[in-house]
Each structure stands twice: as structure tokens, then as C-alpha cells.
Amino acid sequence: MISNYFKIAWRNIRANKLFTVLNIAGLAIGLCVCIVLFSFVNTELSFDKMYSNSENIYRVNMETSEEYDFETWATMPNSVGPAMSEDIPQVKKMTRLIKDDFGATASLKIGDNNFTENNLYLADSTVFEMFDFKFIAGNSKNVFSKPKSIVLSQSAKARLFGEQEAMGRLITVNNRDTLQVSGVYVDLPKNSVLDCAMVYNIMDSWMGTNVYWSNASYETYVQLHPDTNVAVVEKQATALIDKYVDKEGQYFTKFFLQPLTKIHLYSADVREGYSTKLGNITTIKSLLFLSLLVLFIACINYMNLATANSRKRSKSIGMNKVLGANRRQMLSLFYVETGILVLISIIIAFGISFLALPLFKSITGNEINYTDLLATPILIGMLAIWLFVTIIAGSYPAFSMSSISPLVLVNKSKKKGSVSEFVRKGLVVFQFAASIVLLIAVTIILQQMSFMKNKNLGYDPNGIIAISVKSAENKQQVQNLMNALEKEPTIKSISATQAMPGSNESGRSVRKLSTDSNGLPIASCRTEGNIVETLKLKLLAGNELPQTIATGDSIIYTLINEKILSYLNYKNPEEAVGKIINTELGDRAIISGVVENFNFNSLKEDIGGYMYYKANDAPEGIRTLLVRYNTKNLPQFLGQLQKNFNDNLPNTAFDYQFVDKHVAQLYASEEKTASTATIFSALAIFIACLGLFGLAAFTAEQRTKEIGVRKVLGATVIGITQLLSKDFLKLVLVAFVIAAPFAYWLMNKWLLDFTYRIEINWWVFALAGVSAILIALLTVSFQAIKAAIANPVKSLRTE
Amino acid sequence: MTMLLELNNIYKWVTQGGNRIFLLKDINLKVEEGEFISIMGPSGAGKSTLLNVIGMLDNFQEGEYNFLDESVDKMKEKNRSKLYKEYIGFVFQAYHLIDELTVYENIETPLLYKNVKSSERKALVADILDRFNIVGKKDLFPSQLSGGQQQLVGVARALVAKPKLILADEPTGNLNSKQSEEIMQLFKELNQEGVTIIQATHSETNAAYGSRTLNLLDGGRIEI
């Protein structure tokens, strides 16, 4: 009996080619999206589960005090780890993890060659056991037994040494420390938040030997004994704060333990971690929701097309009933048909998803391997989806068609039209409503992106290149380089600074009175001068920082932004010029000038306090040259720069970044959101149109006789096209009315995340509505025109 | 001769704008096994309706219907369909073959719904194909057959489950005279073998093949 169902189902599928193709197209697209996203989500959820002690490893996070807005940080003082290890018996192992030079790019010198490295870490030797490092050269137990040792990942080793032996070789880091390679380890898993390319012993640096309770820069991981009560350990850890830190130094108030396996997806609110491999659980949830939505739209298509097709098949169904089929047998037949169609769609979907992987990577930046697509959870998931879709998509048509009475054979069937018509129309409305919401969302997201890119930041990031000089061997080299560059005609101005805006400034505070306990947290950045010119800041009062200071001058010259100005309660900028400012830099800091607020951080954040300063004996060093250029020939310009750099800093790697690209990267995740949303709306609309196309075809066929009669009575082709299209356009309008308020609410919520945001304009909604109508018209008109120009003789011929 | 079915005071109407339009009015009919009855009457008289009621495809508002001494109108839907599956075969004017199935598969279909075993199905279908001389056509699709051949298959399909009663609604309506004659001749043979046949027809010639004629007047009344 089952084999008979297969036979009949197969024959029916082949007999109704248009219907089959439309359905398979829609389902395959929806399923392809699901497959790709499920693989992605599968990988995301698998992060950090592979370590033998994954369940017992936690990262210590800390909550800061009011001064720092109660933020949660992933980094803390280097004393926390050892204190926890000593005082809390449940802590079995501990390691600290910190990027070299607090995250700035490291400059490596091997023999005569210079390299840059972004993922050079310092850690305790316990890190190798905790995270199952597998060494292919050297032994994890003694790689750090010799002082000044360093271990490399396999890829790092290949990059630095190629095929040559690496063990025992010397690497000079930042022209300061010389380390010897004592081990090579297998690359850390792709799905782990740990991204160490090289590791050296934290105890070989002041970072490990000078242990104190300020300078929150160190990530700390602990491995607890199994079955430990985590909440108790958190309390014990928090108690250490009062034990070791006096009240004044307590800018943090609590410690939390974040399970290792949750770091990757649940760190959206945790700041300052070093890993670059962070995802977001909200993104995962949104992507899953969107993919299920697209699939659901495809299922609705199926329902619509199947029930529309039922008119054609009603005679055959009625006959089967006369011949003795009961309802259950008819239901089985239809479910088998749906099942076969869905199976074919799944197979095609797998095929398309292999092709779609590169596209996915270019949009989201995430890579999925071909093998990931065939992972067991995915295959099981697809089996479940197959059943799920067959039931969801197949139930309504199956029940609707199996209830057709045999009386259709003698044209005595009841006009069931009203109920099923209503449902069908409702489904079309839903599809289009979802598509319109997506259209509006995409438009607004793209608007916001464009706004952020073009907003006046208060300084001009375009046309500036930042060159790292922190690994220069001495100050003279940097001075020589600056002198050489000043001679170049392509360079307009150079400013030697601690950091480019928004990266690696120092955290200080400004107080109204020197006796205040709390102040305004600010970012401070040392510079040697003409920063206003190079960054094109807007000077509101006072002067640029002085070009030169006399050698014995102990005054600290500062440039403050409006935020600091208003905190200090000055009525206007001129009032502040020349006044003393209370900050940790010393009691001889005065205000040289005031600049307009500028967005040194992402536009998602408020502007905080910012201060540039220049002084003799400054606590921070000069690490970056900001160079404003005025040439369009970038390759040649870069070549010149490199030559000048290598001439003057022969033992340092040439490391640079364009400031405008750095700024653009701040919005990388929003760009991804924009691209993803665009793709999803295109897919949703496409599938909705497939459905509409099929429906229009069937409606036209249904009304063939009516159209024939109207033509005979004198209707024009245009008139008939209008007649057929009118009903569908009404549906689209209803969809718009439903979609618009929802979209408004949704996008309003999304925009609230941005401190600097656009207003939602009415024309966005009008645009979406008109687009939806045009698309619907286009889809329907093809069928309508085809029906309208048909020969009435053919359509009126009786059977 | 046993009583096959009995209709007593059957009324069937539809309401249109507040009025009752009678499709069948006070129908009384007794059919014994082995009869060959022709129901005649003008268009719209209710011939097809009557056949549908007898065949349990349609229901009625008033009256009694007994089939083999069981009260059909009081039966549950499930039992009713079991009854007509078992005992009744339908032949339509428009053949209504299933276009996606071959001749063999079309004939086989009622047996499938009765859950007849595969080997038994093969035997029954082979028998019928043989009897109707269409063995060579068993793998063809309806679109490849002539009208007469299609109707033949329709009759074969109605017969394969060995029903007691065949209901034929204008079986030769779409056939030419030669094909009509062949079909009617077939019916005669079947009737002689013991199958009860009730046909609705316009044609006097066809009606003559029957043993009894019923005239249905406009409004669904039987002329005595």
C-alpha cells in the first residue's frame, strides 16, 4: 500500500510541473538557509567544550565601582589569581593571560628579519595543562623551566621559520626582550576563545613579578575541583577585596566566575577581554529566528499552492473515495507526496548550501567548512526538519483535500470556497507582511550605517595613517624618522602620540578639587604637539599644545575636550584657559586649550572626557606617529614610508593602520547585521513572490471560463488584467497595514542602542509599501496578461 | 429472489431563498437481486440524484433506505462506506479514470482500498483484463485510449471487487452507437451472471436492455 502511495505521489509530482518547481524552489531556499545557519550555530555552541577540564574552568570577571559605571570587566589586577589560588582551597589551578604590551602589536626580530604579531601572550605555566596544549616539539611540563623561553603555535612557527627548525632559536620582542623557543604546540582549536599564537612566561616579566592590586589588565582563569559550589567560591573571592585592598583603592567591588563554555556567546556586556573570537548569543537567536521565518514562509507557499491545486485534483480525489478510500488513506497519500517533495528539496538545499558557503563567509566573516555541513547534529537536525516541514506544510492541504466529497464528480460539491479562500488569502498576507517588515528594517539599518559613516566625528579620520614606533630601539630613531618624513611633500603634518584615537589611551580621572575622592574618568593621551592640526580637531579656546618645551619646565600642558570643561563647571571655554586642572599627572597641570567634543570611540557610546597632554618626563611613551598625507597614490606612498621607516628603524617591523579603516571596523558588527538583513529580506521576498506567482497562475486558470465570457462581452486585455490583479493588490495593502506599525516598533528598539542615531522617516514606509506593491504587480501581471490574451473560444469550449 | 434494497418515502430537497426545491419527492422503490432496472426521465428530473442516494454517496432528508435488510440512513458514516465498498460498483458517464495511473493500476485501485493481498489482487485484475480483452492495454494510460476503451476500463474497475450491485449513470452518454452497443451487451451478460444493475439513461434503446423501467418525472416523482 505504501509503495502505491509512492507511485501515485511521484506521478502527481511529475504531472504538475509548475507547482512542483515553485514549491521545490521555495522550500530549497528556505532549507538551504536553515542548513547553513544551523551549521554556523552548531559551531558557535561548541566553543570551548573540547578541553578535558572544560566543565571546571572559569574566567574570573569583576564588577567595577560607580566611578566606572559598574561595568563588568574580564581583566583585573595580576594579584587576583595568586590570591585566589592561595586563599581558596577549591581553586585547583590558576593562570593569568595577558597580551604583550597590553594588546598593542608586537614587533619581532629573528636574525635579520622583522615580523609583527598580534597574538603574543604572557601566561603562567599552568596554562598548558589547563587548556590541553599538545606539544609536537618540547614537553608541556618543562617548556618554561628555563627563563626567557617562548613557545609557538604550529602556524606561528611556519610563518616565522618556514621549514627550518625553530627549537632553540632566538626571538627579540619589541627590541627589548630576547626569548628562546622551547616548544611548538598544535594550533589551538578554531572553536575556542583562546587565540594564543605564541606564549611566554609571565614570570619572566614585571607583569608576573610585580604583583599589586591596581592596573586591571590581566585575564584570570581558574580551574575548580569538580562539584564545587561556584557561588561560594565567588563569595570567597569577593571577600578577598576587603582583605587585601584598602577602601581608597577599591575601584572594583565583586568577582564573578564565568564558565569557560559560556565566554564565547555570553560576553556581550563584559568589557576588555583579549580574545578576538567572541560571538553573541543574541545574534545566534536572531539568526535562528530569521532562518525559521524564511522556512515558514516557504511552508506557507506550499500550503497555498497545494490547496490551490486541489481544484484540479478534486475529481481524482472524489473518484478515489467512490472506489473505497477512507479519509485516513487519503491523508497518508498527501503526506507521502509532501514528504517526497520536501526530501527532494532538502537534497537540493544541501547542494546549494555548499555553493553558498563562500557567500556566507564574505557577508558574516565566519567560515564554515564543507565537513561542518555534514556534522551529525546537522544531519539529525535535517531529519527532524524533514518531519517537521512535512507535517507543518502538509497538514493543511492534506486535511483540506482529503475532505473532498465524491459528489464533486457530479458537480454537486458544496462551495467550500469561502473558508479555504480566506485561509489562503491570510497566508499570502502573512508572507507579504513579513517581507515588508524586513524591507523596512533593511532600509533603516542601511540609513543608520550610512549616517554613522558620514557623521562629523569632530575630527577627520580620513587621510591619516598611524605608524607604530613603540618598538624603536631608542628615541633618536623616532626623531630621525620624523625629520625624514617632514621633508616628504606628500605629508602635510605629523603628530607623535601615545595612541591613535580610541585605542590604548590611559585611564585617569579629573577632579574638581584636588581633595575630591571621586572624579570624572577620562582617557588621556600623551602627544608631542600639533595634534589639533593633524587630527583637524576644532579648537574652541586657547592654543595647540606648545611645539617645544624648555628642558627644565615641569609644567604639564593639557588640551581638554568639552566634556571635561562642563564637568569642571566653566561657563565658557575661554574661562578655562590657563587654569590648573587636577589629575593624577601632577599638581602642575594647566589647560592650554579646549577642543570641541570628538567621537574617539564608537558612535554607540557617549563621548567621555578626553585629554591630550605634553610634558617633560611624561609617564607614557610615544608609540605612534599619526601622519596626515595628501596623495592619492597609496601604493607608492606606502612604499616610500616603508623605506623611510626601515632606514631609520632597521630592527623594527613596519606596522601601520589607516585611521579611517580603524574607525570603520568599530561598526563591523553593524555592517554584518546590515548585510544579513538585506540577504534575508531578499530571500523572503523572493519566496513570497514564488508563492504569489503560483497562486496567480491558479487563480487565472480557475477563472478561465469567466475571462472567456468577459472577453466575448467586450472586455479589454487591460480591463481583465486589472480585474485579476486587483484582488492580490488588496492583499498586499492589508499586509502593509499590519506590517508598518510592527516594523516601526522593532526598528525604534534597535536604534535605541545607538547614542547617535537617525530619525525614522515616513518615506521609508512609503517606499517599502510601494516596492511591495510593484513587486506583487510584476509577479501577478505576467499571469494576468497571459490569461487576458487567451482565445475565448478555447476557454469556453465545454468538455 | 432476495430483496437487495428498499427505498421508502424518500424525500430530498434543497432550500433556496426560503423555498424548498424537491430533488426527490416520495420515492418508493424495491429492488430484488438479479434485476436490471433502467431509470428514465427528462433532464433535471433527478436520475443522478437517485443513483447517488442508492449508492450511499448522497443523503436524504426524509424516508428510509434499507440495503440487504440493514437500515442505511441510521448507519454511521464508517459502516456505510464499508457497505458500499463491499457491495456496490459505480460507472459514470464521464468515466472518471485516474489519469496518472495505468489501466492495470486503475482497475486495481478499489482492491487496494479493501486491503486485498497483493497476489490476490494480481489474480483478480488479470481475470478482468482477460474477460474484457484488454490485456494488451494494461500498461497504457487513459489518455492513450479511445472513449469506448476508457469506459470499458471504468466498467472493469467497477466490477473487479465483485459487487452485488452496479449503478451506471448514463454509461454510454459519451460513446458512439457501436461502442454503446458493446457496453450494453456487456451489462446484459453481467446481469445474466447475477449482478444487479440499475442504470440511469436517456436512451430508449439502452433502456430496453433492462427488465424494468422507472420513469422519473420533473420534481423527482416516480410515475407509476
Image (cartoon, coloured by chain):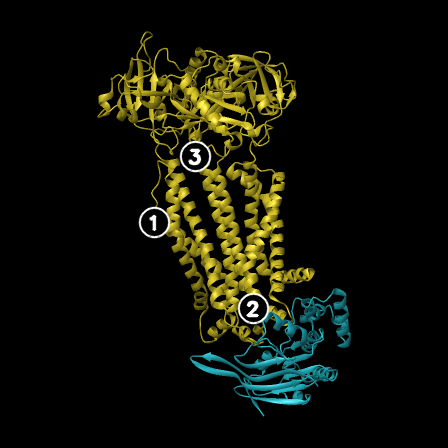
Chain colours: A yellow, B cyan
Quick one: label 1, few (<14), some, or many (20+) residues within 10 Å? few
Chain for disc number 2: A
Q: Which residue is mark 2?
A: A404
Q: Is residue A469 left or right of residue B59?
A: left
Q: Which residue is mark 3?
A: A667
Name the residue type under label 2.
Ile
Q: Residues within 10 Å of mark 3 (few under 14, many from 20)?
A: some
For marks 3 and 1, give the CA distance.
26 Å
Label 2: how many Cα within 10 Å (few below 14, some 14–19, many 20+): many
Q: Earlier in the sequence, mark 1 or mark 2?
A: 2
Closer to us: mark 1 or mark 2?
Answer: 2
Q: Position of residue B71 (x, y in %)?
A: 60, 78
Q: Chain of mark 3?
A: A
The total of numbered circles placed on residues is: 3
Q: The N terminus of chain B is located in which quarter?
A: bottom right
Residue under the image location 58 percent in, 71 percent down: B77
Picture quadrant where residue A554 is located:
top left
* Residue A619 in view: yes
Q: Which residue sits at x=62%, y=67%?
A: A326
- Residue type highlighted by circle 1: Trp
Please state the chain letter of the residue tagged with numbered disc 1 in the rendered image: A
Q: Residue furthest bottom?
A: B224
In x, y percent, where is residue A502? 40, 26
Is residue B202 in sight in this rendering?
Answer: no
- Residue B41 at x, y percent in the picture: 58, 88
Residue at disc 1, secondary structure:
helix
Q: Is residue A633 left or right of residue A68?
A: right
Q: Are marks 1 and 2 in contact (CB under 8 Å)?
A: no
Q: Which residue is mark 1?
A: A762
